[in-house]
């Protein structure tokens, strides 16, 4: 099976712009979660989508949003970019069928976003 | 916010030696996972240990869990240069990660 893929791998934007990142989960996985990794805050959960619905949400401002399509592919969008949004954005997929029980999540290689 | 701390923050050993890293967490858990991250890339799942397990092995990895102390340890035996990476523990359905241990294995 192909792993989790993320596009683009690298991105440079300027403050005030918006950005859309894409994630394709492992075939058959219906849950996609997004994480932000920065040197200062470490790895932080953004949100999770399951069957096209946001099932869980982290503590991030409304500028961070996401969606999931019927084929389980997911996108996240960050509007009005700030310098502090520079980070590695990771998505992870899992079957999602265990509800709120922890299960193994498989991560993609990440998208590195630099905001100038 | 971080669930807890990994200790040490950085560890440098020679190839062939064992590496031990510890993780503490704050809340009750159903299970705990360890992940590896190579140089700012994606995370690779290493092992999951359930709250009713005390020890688990996978190849050269040995994980222990002490729920009374809210702590876990990861032991990598006979380390290799390819083990050089950051190691994170994570808990919860919405994975909450520790701060990570940066392991450097030198030849």
Image (cartoon, coloured by chain):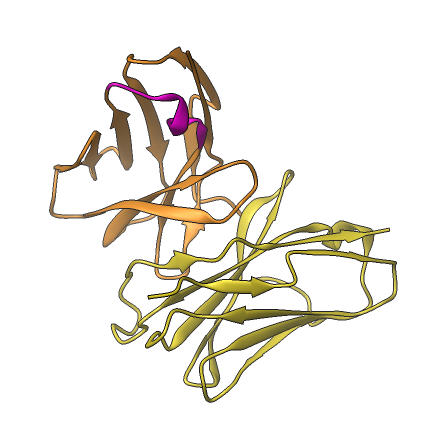
Task: State the image coordinates of residue A101 (x, y, percent, origin top left).
Answer: 26, 66
* Side of A41 where B35 appears, left or right: left
Q: Is residue A70 left or right of residue A77?
A: left
Choose between A6 and A60: the one closer to the eye.
A6
The C terminus of chain B lies in quadrant:
top left
Q: Is residue B82 magenta?
A: yes
Residue at x 39%, y 65% (from the top left corner):
A2
Residue positioned 29% across, 12% down in the render: B17
Residue A115 location, x and y as percent? 81, 53
x and y percentages locating residue B29 in the rendered image? 27, 51
A107 up-or-down from A27: above or below: above
Q: Colour of chain A?
A: yellow
- Which segment is the magenta one? B78-85
Residue beneath the point at 64% across and 56% down: A9
Q: Is residue A106 magenta?
A: no
Classify residue A101 as left or right of residue A86: left
**Looking at this view, is A21 or A35 the one in front?**
A21
Q: Colour of chain B?
A: orange
């Amino acid at each position: 099976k192909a792993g989790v893929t993320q596009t683009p791998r690298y991105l440079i934007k300027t403050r005030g712009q918006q950005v859309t990142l894409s994630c394709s989960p492992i075939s058959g996985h219906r849950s996609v979660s997004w994480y932000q990794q920065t040197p200062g805050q470490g790895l932080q959960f953004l949100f999770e989508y399951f069957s096209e619905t946001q099932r869980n949400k982290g503590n991030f401002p409304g500028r961070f949003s996401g969606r999931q399509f019927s084929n389980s592919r997911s996108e996240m969008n960050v509007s009005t970019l700030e310098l502090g949004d520079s980070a590695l954005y990771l998505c992870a997929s899992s079957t999602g069928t265990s509800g709120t029980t922890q299960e193994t999540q498989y991560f993609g290689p990440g998208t590195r976003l630099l905001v100038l | 916010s971080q669930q807890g701390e990994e200790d040490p923050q950085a560890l440098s050993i020679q190839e062939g030696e064992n590496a031990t890293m510890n993780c503490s967490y704050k809340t009750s858990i159903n299970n705990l996972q360890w992940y590896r991250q190579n140089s700012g890339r994606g995370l690779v799942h290493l092992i999951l240990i359930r709250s009713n397990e005390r020890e688990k092995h996978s190849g050269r990895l040995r994980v222990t869990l002490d729920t009374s102390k809210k702590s876990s340890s990861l032991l990598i035996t006979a380390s290799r240069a390819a083990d050089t990476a950051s190691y994170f523990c994570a808990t919860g359905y919405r994975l909450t990660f520790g701060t990570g241990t940066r392991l450097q294995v030198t030849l």
